[in-house]
Image (cartoon, grey):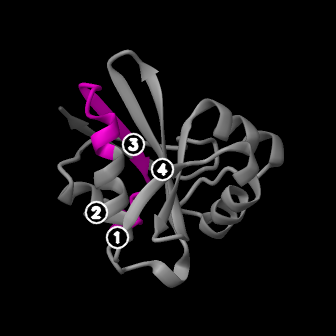
């Protein structure tokens, strides 16, 4: 992990964002995969490519819900770069960008233990359990961090 940084995705990055999201798509990660949704995602949310030097290792994103709330709505690391510290570094960097919002939230599948551990280590707490959160029949934990 020589030089980890976040680079804001543009519409030119839509293929890369789609590729990352599709790789993350599973029962425990509700991915954005349709072209029109990807374009809206890049235009309307803060989507960042996670780079190690010039190599894209994943993405992290958030959106502003209200003036006082931001929601982290995506974190995907390419499989070959997982468990190497990129997720925690990227989340630390994006949390700095979100620190002007008193409340940051996210949702995570209750069986995604690596993600839950990561978020707890960064100061998130579990606020609630919600069944069928995305309409996919799967529950999610709502986690929050207050600044």
Of mark 3 and mark 2, the one earlier in the sequence is 3
Residue at figure coordinates x 82%, y 47% from the top left: 35
Of mark 3 and mark 4, the one earlier in the sequence is 3
Distance between the alpha carbons at the discs numbered 2 and 4:
19 Å
Q: Marks 1 and 3: in contact by CB < 8 Å? A: no
Q: Circle 2 sits on which residue?
A: 118
Q: Marks 4 and 2: in contact by CB < 8 Å? A: no
Say if 33 sits above or below 20 in the image: above
Tag 1 secondary structure: helix
Residue at figure coordinates x 67%, y 56% from the top left: 17
**Nearer to us: label 2 or label 4:** 2
Q: Circle 3 sits on which residue?
A: 106
Q: Is residue 75 visible?
A: yes
**Which numbered disc covers residue 74?**
none
Packing grade of label 4 (10 A; few <14, some 14-19, many >=20) is some
Task: Please state the extent of the stretch shown in magenta in the rendering.
Answer: 95-115
Q: Circle 4 sits on which residue?
A: 139
**Which numbered disc covers residue 114?**
1
Distance between the alpha carbons at the discs numbered 3 and 2:
12 Å
Q: Is residue 109 visible?
A: no
Q: Marks 2 and 1: in contact by CB < 8 Å? A: yes
Image quadrant of residue 135? top right
């Amino acid at each position: 992990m020589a030089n980890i940084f976040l680079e804001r995705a543009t519409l030119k990055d839509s293929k890369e964002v789609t590729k990352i999201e599709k790789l993350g798509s599973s029962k425990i990660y509700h991915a954005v995969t349709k072209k029109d949704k990807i374009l809206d995602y890049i235009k309307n949310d803060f989507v960042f490519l996670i780079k190690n030097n010039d190599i894209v290792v994943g993405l992290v994103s958030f959106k502003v819900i209200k003036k006082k709330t931001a929601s982290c709505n995506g974190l995907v690391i390419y499989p070959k770069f997982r468990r190497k510290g990129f997720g925690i570094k990227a989340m630390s960097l994006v949390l700095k960008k979100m620190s002007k919002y008193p409340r940051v939230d996210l949702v995570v599948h209750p069986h995604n233990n690596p993600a839950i551990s990561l978020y707890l280590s960064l100061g998130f707490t579990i606020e609630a359990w919600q069944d069928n959160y995305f309409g996919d029949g799967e529950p999610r934990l709502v986690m929050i961090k207050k600044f």
